[in-house]
Amino acid sequence: QVQLVESGGGLVQAGGSLRLSCVASGRTISTYAMGWFRQAPGKEREFVTTINAGGSTFNADSVKGRFTISRDNAKNAVYLQMDSLKPEDTAVYYCATGRYSRRPLDYDNWGQGTQVTVSS
């Protein structure tokens, strides 16, 4: 079983940047795809971006050109660099292990989430 812990969330002004981290323990994540999802109050969990074991990525249209996912297998970690943040990016952000997919159902290990709040 893999345990995932996210960190790096916080309050930032619109146009600012944050870097989220997701550190895994219990098992290596090098063979998994890793995804980032987010959930705003009253909304369903939403796909943000994913990276496969080979380093290929794809993003949701809403974050293209602004968010970048990366991984460091030596540190058993995945990162989300978020630039040009907008108030609509406000949500709890979760990382997860699973298949290279935009569907939450394709991911089976989830972290507890980290809050990102973007003020206008």
Image (cartoon, helix red, strand yellow):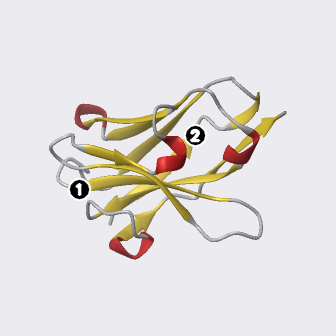
Q: Amino acid at mark 2?
A: Ser
Residue 57 versus residue 15 in the image, above or below: below
Q: CA distance from mark 1 to mark 2?
A: 20 Å
Q: Considering only vertical position in the picture, is 110 above or below 22?
A: below
Q: Report x, y in % for residue 19.
A: 54, 30
Provide the secondary structure element on which disc 2 rests.
Answer: strand
Is mark 1 in CB contact (under 8 Å) with mark 2? no
Q: Secondary structure at mark 1?
A: loop
Q: Position of residue 67 (x, y in %)?
A: 49, 35
Q: Nearer the viewer, residue 62 or 5?
A: 62
Q: Position of residue 62 (x, y in %)?
A: 54, 47
78 shown above or below 37: above
Q: Which residue is mark 1?
A: 32
The residue sitting at 67% across, 45% down in the picture is 89
- Crowdedness of circle 2 by 10 Å Cα count: few (<14), some, many (20+)? some
Front residue of this view, candidates 24 and 88: 88
Q: Disc 2 marks which residue?
A: 7
